[in-house]
Image: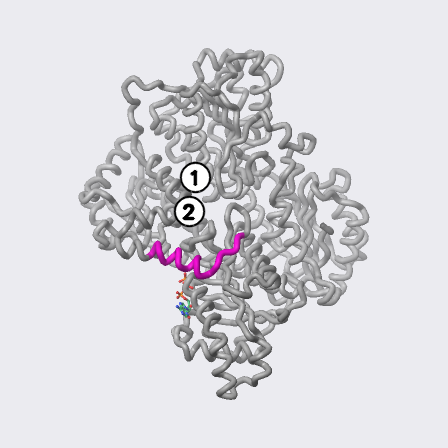
Amino acid sequence: MAITKIGVLTSGGDASGMNAAVRAIVRTGLDHGLEVCAIHEGYRGLIEGGDKIRPLRWSDVGGIIHRGGTVIGSARSDEFRTREGRLKAARNMLQHGMDSLVVVGGDGSLTGADVLRGEWPEFLEELVARHDVDAALAAAHPRLTVVGLVGSIDNDAAGTDMTIGADTALHRITEAIDAIGSTASSHQRAFIVEVMGRHCGYLALMGAIATGADALFIPECPPTDDNWEAGLVAGLLAGRAAGRRDSIVVLAEGATDRQGTPITTERLRQVLASGLGEAVRVTVLGHMQRGGAPSAFDRNLGTVMGYAAIETLLAGDADTRSLVMGMRGNRVVRIPLEECVAESRRINDALGAREFDRALELRGASFNDALRTFNTLLKTLPHPPAAGQRRLRLGILHAGAAAPGMNAAVRAAVRLTTDDGHVALGIRRGFHGLVTGELSDMNWMSVNGWAPMGGAELGTSRDVPAGPDFYAIARTIEQHAIDGLLIIGGWEAYEGAHRLFEERKNFPAFNIPVVCLPATIDNNLPGTELSIGADTALNSIVSVVDKIKQAAVAEQRCYVVEVMGRRCGYLAMMSGLATGAERVYLHEEGITLKALVEDLELLVRGFTQGKRLGLMIRSEHANDVYDTAFMCALFEEEGGGLFDVRQSILGHLQQGGDPSPFDRIQATRLARLSIRRLAEQAAAGQPAAEFIGMRSGTVAFGSFEDYPRLIDAANRRPKQQWWLELRRINHALARPAPRMGAARTSEEGQTLMGNPRP
Ligand code: ATP
């Protein structure tokens, strides 16, 4: 039977990004002509019924995407754990003619929905027998369909790379540890920072990598040494002796020792105070980790998952078993709820049984990879080179514009190179430094404190080598006996590396392994779905647009916000999705005068009907004739005085700022794998020229032999861009559905207007 009405609830601990999910569920549902009811206060509201279950209109979920927590409320309900409680819930759902449920919550909440689903047929019989519902109503709703979205800051769910809320929590943790780091180093102090995560060490581990912490305790990996306290103190003292001014120990709330005894902040404080002989400060981050505006990633994750939930319901895919929406490598996956919950439980059971190695293994490859990376980077000093080992000399440089996260990549590359007994050479100012021979040895401490730093300490340049540069570069490579190059940067890095590759026949010195590591806010590089810096830029854009929207609420105004990206619309597209923009202009789609006139008509209609704010996001080179100023002038002049128009060109603020946790972590991970690749190839005498990237959730290398066929050189972007698929979601959530009437009040009290036709 066709679905006509669905319920949505948020349950368990709140998580940032839940609102984006609710917004997407409601609007996608309405767009398909469904009625969508919010069940306020989770399962408690479902049991209570009455006005706890209310239909939502398009406008009811306007202006919520940027808010933390959940606007429809969340709760824990002991009554729902009882059969009697769930029977009441079933009765209320039937009385509302509802037999489809989208639940956003942790594994407890998802399990609860699945239990109700299993009991539904017997509940129908019972309710009919009791005359609580009539037989025809029961017959019309023979089964309950459940789709789940994992909303939890802990990132403890199996089957999905990320849960809604984890990235925002990581932002809060990283900001807090960065702030603590600056005070700790001013006073040469030790700090213990306790982070949330219950039995999962994800937040602690990623927070520790992102901030370059000095020690870490997580549930999955208790200290192996019985005398770990002494080892901890010795490590921190050695760090001080090597020049570090502070010590930051990150402790996951569920951490224990091998015997299962909790490692508490107090226990650690005593160990450090007596061992280091200095004041030790403890910060328990607590609920601030849950709060605050959701990160761009969580908004988009919630949005994409919410959209997918409705598609799944409508396709009938969840008719026979409950499904959970997950994300693997930027793609939506649908996992049977039972499997997802059972797998998560297996990890908790392993931890409970103190089978730590098994728990660690179950957390998956990237968790383990991250832990290995952290353990290598936290060492005070590198391993000395092994006797007789070949000591490679690896050059590290940037090229292209600065991107947040470049320093984190260099830090990891230098430390891992030296830890492997090789020599890291820092090349200044991009290819320019390679031409002029501006390079120097870098050591463990020369990159100390670089993990959180924005910009590019090595310096960068947009120069791409040409003509006489090749001879000079060949001479530098030979004179300094460079065995391999790691080029961290954007389009110019790839162009330059490709030219060196092409010139191999003329310059034998170029026959050394080269790896390009993608670092540009534009996210316009081949061989990777994401480049380092793009996440930070996206978050910068989103936080400015939030402010612009707040500033405009009292007026009738349309903003045209221009974002960077050159001819790649990634930043425009993703920031449009994350801010609820009603129109996104991309070079990939182009802009025609006809479309602008249509947009104008929709603006006029909307403002006539009471709209207060319009938000259009435009990629900087979407169309060089119809530029931002032209669009603003057109809208203003032809708007008949109904509204005013302001342009906002965000400019270089998008390139600056401290890198986001994601950019730091990915930079570190990619640098580690790149250095390993260079060393392997140099040792094996196979000088490939490659670029590293993240594709479908895994890290892969591409060859510069394939580079020309992967790129759209004229527009400086890859031929294939995965994120273009997301346009349909933007269209669905920003466009008035014809079924719903021509003009609906949206979001920020505005009327939604048409987006570009796909
Ligand atoms: P978080 O990860 O934030 O703790 P969660 O969804 O796992 O979220 P829980 O407290 O475990 O949080 O569950 C939330 C609610 O889901 C519970 O209060 C209860 O109403 C319902 N619930 C949980 N487990 C079950 C179960 N086994 N059977 C029925 N209902 C359940």
Q: Depth check: 258 or 632 in front? A: 258
Q: Residue at x 74, y 57 (%)?
A: 643
Badge 1 density bin: few <14, some 14–19, many ≥20, Cα 10 Å = many
Disc 1 from disc 2: Cα separation: 9 Å
Q: Quadrant of residue 156?
A: bottom left
Picture layout, residue 88 above or below residue 243: below
Residue 601, percent from left and from top: 79, 57
Residue 159: percent from left, percent from top: 45, 53
Q: Amino acid at mark 2?
A: Thr
Q: Which residues are magenta?
A: 333-348
Q: Earlier in the sequence, mark 1 or mark 2?
A: 2
Q: Position of residue 537 (x, y in %)?
A: 55, 42
Question: In the rendered structure, are the residues bearing label 1 and label 2 in contact, judged by CB atoms less than 8 Å apart?
Answer: yes
Split into 4 quadrants, where in the image is the N terminus?
A: bottom right
Using residue 310 as the reference point, say whether residue 408 is left or right of it. Answer: left
In this figure, which colouring scheme has been used for the structure? one colour
In the rendered image, residue 343 lying in the magenta stretch gets the answer yes
Q: Which residue is nearer to you in this view: 437 or 158? A: 158
Q: Secondary structure at mark 1?
A: loop
Q: Is residue 277 visible?
A: no
Circle 2 is placed at which residue position? 174
> Extreme bottom residue here?
131
* Residue 257 showing in the rendered view: yes
Identify the residue at image location x=33%, y=39%.
185
- Is 138 located above or below residue 428 in the figure? below
Q: Which amino acid, mark 1?
A: Pro
Position of residue 736 measured from the top left corner of the image (x, y, whole percent)? 71, 61
Name the residue carrying label 1.
452
- In the depicted view, which residue is nearer to us: 64 or 423? 423
